[in-house]
Amino acid sequence: MTEEQIRLRPTRSSLTIGGLIKHALVTERGWADLVRGRMQSTDERAYEDTFTLTEGDTLASLLADFDQVAADTEAAVASLASLDVAVQLPDAPWFPKNAEG
């Protein structure tokens, strides 16, 4: 992909390829934080911003984030005593009430 391609909007949606990649990275980072018991932001505006590329977001920065997030997720999973560990999901509009993940 190129810098231009990550900013393309191939459908009528306002979503871009790069924005979807950024959102996936933020979401994976959030799951690793949950596994570690770190509090998650439930700010809806901040959540919406995870889909949007800023001027500072580049293909190189997304790829670097991808490598960092993958390593962090691997470390978070390796730190678990078992893959059967349940995690309390935060109170957020996009999660069911009192749900575990």
Image (cartoon, helix red, strand yellow):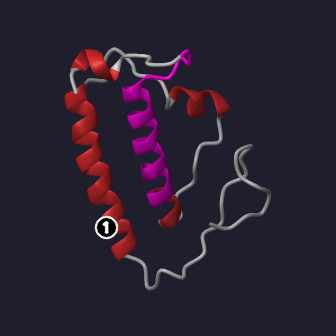
Q: Residue shown at 44%/16% (left/top)?
A: 9
Residue 27 position in % (x across, y down):
48, 47
Q: Residue at x 39, y 18 (%)?
A: 54
Q: Mark 1 points at which residue?
A: 75
Q: In this view, does 7 lie above or below 51?
A: above
Give the x, y percent position of residue 74. 31, 66
**Count of picture labels:** 1
**Does the stretch in magenta take in 16?**
yes
The secondary structure that dominates the magenta segment is helix
- The quarter in which the C terminus is drawn is bottom right
SS at mark 1?
Answer: helix
* Residue at the limit of the structure toward the bottom, as seen here: 81
Location of the N terminus by quadrant is top left
Does 84 appear above or below 49?
below
Name the residue rendered at 73%, 52% in the picture.
Answer: 91
Percent coordinates x, y for residue 99 in the rendering: 73, 64
**Quadrant in the picture for residue 26:** top left
Mark 1 nearby-residue class (10 Å; few <14, some 14–19, many ≥20)? few
Residue under the point 53% across and 26% down: 49
Q: For residue 91: magenta? A: no
Give the x, y percent position of residue 3.
24, 19
Residue that protrudes farthest toward the front in the picture:
11
Q: Taking 99 as reference, is 30 left or right?
A: left
Please tell me which residue lies in front, 7 or 47: 7
Q: What stretch is highlighted in magenta?
A: 12-32
Relative to residue 19, is residue 75 drawn left or right? left
Work out whether 68 lies above or below 1.
Answer: below
Kind of residue at disc 1: Ala
Q: Which quarter of the picture shows residue 16?
A: top left
